[in-house]
Image: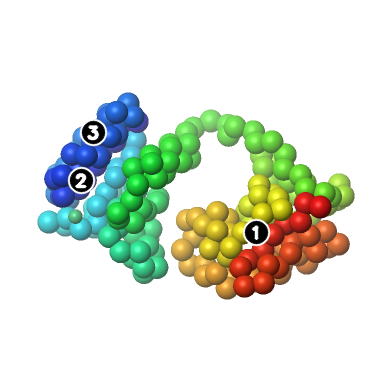
């Protein structure tokens, strides 16, 4: 990918550039917001790694201006604090994803791969059908059946079920479900997970009892 790193911490900027280049990315580096904005609008930038705390205009403002000008380049925001309001503000400003400092390079790398996949044009790779007992989920067709009968799920219920089907028999905490089932939706609280599990159980009918409560921890999809 052709990446732009906008980061005023010069040491961090240099380290990121080196690591990303070792991963065969082409990397431009800007140490302030205005320079970053100019570079971000150059042709061929696939993703911007954007620090929030910059010396001139904030990363949030950079993201807002890019989106306002219609730039669709993926933005991965680096934030120093992990509070819900920071994340909401970052995503509202136009970021596609965020990473809380300090972060492991492997995580940055994984997030970039995810952004690249989402940006890829053309048909999605067909995913295998997920099946546990009578429940079957067809990723590509966004279809769920129980004993062969179609079940109509909302997008969130679908994501939640997908998460359970990917980890049959495993106990998943509310936070894990939250992160995996709707990673980009920051307005959801762990309590909402309980509500969606309830809807999901109801819609799955008899098979709903397979979604077991693990008291004090979370939920598990029984594969027995
Ligand atoms: Ca900074």
Q: Quadrant of residue 109?
A: top left
Is residue 17 something one can see in this rendering? yes
Of the two numbered discs 1 and 2 on the same chain, state the one appearing first in sequence: 2
Q: Name which residue lies at 43% across and 37% down.
A: 113
Q: Quadrant of ligand 1?
A: bottom left
User: Disc 3 beta carbon < 8 A from ligand 1?
Assistant: no
* Position in image of residue 123 (x %, y %): 58, 32
> Relative to residue 204, is residue 69 drawn left or right?
left
Camera-side residue: 123 or 16?
16
**Mark 3 — residue?**
18
Q: Name which residue lies at 55% across and 54% down.
A: 180
Gap in Å between the C-alphas at discs 1 and 2? 37 Å
**Mark 1 — residue?**
171
Is residue 182 something one can see in this rendering? no
Gap in Å between the C-alphas at discs 1 and 3? 39 Å
The secondary element bearing badge 2 is classed as helix
The secondary element bearing badge 1 is classed as strand
Q: Name which residue lies at 30% across and 55% down.
A: 101
Mark 2: few/some/many CA within 10 Å (<14, 14-19, 20+): few
Q: Are marks 1 and 2 in contact (CB under 8 Å)?
A: no
User: Disc 2 beta carbon < 8 A from ligand 1?
Assistant: no
Q: Quadrant of residue 220?
A: bottom right
**Quarter that holds the N terminus:** top left
> Relative to residue 190, is residue 58 drawn left or right?
left
**Mark 2 — residue?**
12
* Position in image of residue 33 (x %, y %): 17, 50
């Amino acid at each position: 990918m052709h990446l732009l790193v906008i980061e005023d911490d010069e040491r961090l900027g240099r380290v990121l550039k080196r690591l990303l280049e070792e991963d065969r990315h082409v990397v431009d580096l800007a140490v302030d917001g205005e320079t970053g904005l100019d570079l971000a609008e150059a042709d061929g930038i696939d993703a911007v790694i954007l620090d929030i705390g910059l010396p001139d205009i904030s990363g949030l403002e950079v993201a807002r201006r890019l989106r306002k000008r219609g730039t669709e380049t993926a933005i991965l925001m680096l934030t120093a604090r992990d509070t819900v309001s920071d994340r909401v503000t970052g995503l509202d400003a136009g970021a596609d994803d965020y990473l809380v400092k300090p972060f492991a390079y492997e995580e940055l790398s994984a997030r970039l791969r995810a952004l690249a996949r989402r940006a890829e044009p053309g048909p999605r790779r067909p995913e295998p059908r997920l099946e546990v007992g009578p429940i079957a989920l067809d990723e590509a067709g966004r279809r769920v059946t129980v004993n062969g009968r179609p079940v109509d799920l909302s997008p969130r219920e679908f994501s939640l079920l997908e998460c359970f089907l990917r980890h049959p028999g495993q106990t998943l905490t509310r936070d894990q479900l939250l992160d995996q089932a709707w990673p980009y939706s920051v307005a959801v609280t762990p309590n909402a997970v309980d509500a969606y599990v309830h809807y999901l159980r109801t819609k799955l009918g008899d098979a709903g009892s397979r979604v077991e409560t693990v008291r004090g921890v979370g939920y598990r999809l029984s594969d027995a």
